[in-house]
Amino acid sequence: MRGALAAGVIAGFLVAGLGSRIVMRLIFLADRETEGILTSDQFIVGRVSTDTFNLLAVGTVIGVLIAPIYLGLRRWLPIPRAWRGLGFGYGSLVTGGIILVNDDSVDFRIFEPVMLGVALFAGLFILGGIVLGALMDRFHPDPVYASSVRVPRVAGSILVLVAVLGTLIFLTGLVSLVDEEGSCIAATTDFECIPAAVE
């Protein structure tokens, strides 16, 4: 577990924390007209503040929470060992990513083109899985398990089913975002794209 947590701290800080900050900046640079808008998380678009440190801390915590999940699932992933990090990253995208890509994703509607923002954040999920997998294999190599056929097949089938269903839900949410591109009002909130007051 110590090796897993160490891998989670590093991957979380670099990808979920620092990577998210870089992606947010790239999205802003692609759509500078959003400068000054207050996001749903109360961040002012285009302004770099001390909130960056909070983002790095949150990213690190996410890595710590995700690492044990990967540690428990990696032996059941029905893909070659070298691709397990990538597979886990994709699985994270189509399960955890659906929280971001849906009708209530206010911030994704603000920035255009919406596909750029989704693609960049999707890349973070994939990259996070790859980095976590590589670090985990280094800090805590997968031990040799007793040979079994039935359990891995059942577990692998369940993971494949979850990935397929998650992909369908993710794509449905993505289509709805594209249809609502540029709309600043969320489906279930009263949030609007109003520029924040600049002192």
Image (cartoon, helix red, strand yellow):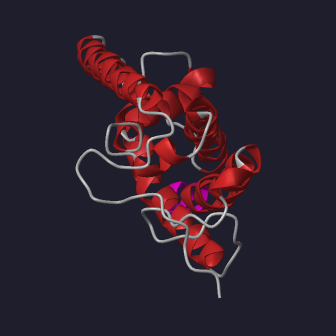
User: Percent position (x, y) of residue 158?
Assistant: 25, 20
Q: Is residue 47 above or below residue 69?
A: below
User: Percent position (x, y) of residue 144?
Assistant: 48, 30
Q: Which residues make up the magenta segment?
A: 1-7
149 horizontally vs 106: left or right: left
43 horizontally vs 190: left or right: right
User: Percent position (x, y) of residue 79?
Assistant: 49, 16
Quadrant in the picture for the C terminus: bottom right
User: Percent position (x, y) of residue 40?
Assistant: 42, 62
* Quarter of the rendering containing residue 167: top left
Type of secondary structure dominating the magenta stretch: helix
Most foreground residue, 98 or 42: 42
The answer, for residue 71, to whether it is visible in the render is: yes
Q: Residue at x 42, y 39 (%)?
A: 97
- Tell me, yes or no, whether the highlighted magenta stretch contains residue 4: yes
Q: Residue at x 68, y 47 (%)?
A: 27
The answer, for residue 1, to whether it is visible in the render is: no
145 horizontally vs 54: left or right: left
Q: Is residue 188 above or below residue 113?
A: below
* Quarter of the rendering containing residue 57: bottom right
Q: Is residue 105 above or below residue 152?
A: below
Most foreground residue, 141 or 64: 64
- Tell me, yes or no, whether the highlighted magenta stretch contains residue 149: no
Q: Residue at x 50, y 28 (%)?
A: 90
Most foreground residue, 116 or 186: 186
- Number of on-image labels: 0
Q: Is residue 110 above or below residue 61?
A: above
* Quarter of the rendering containing residue 118: top right
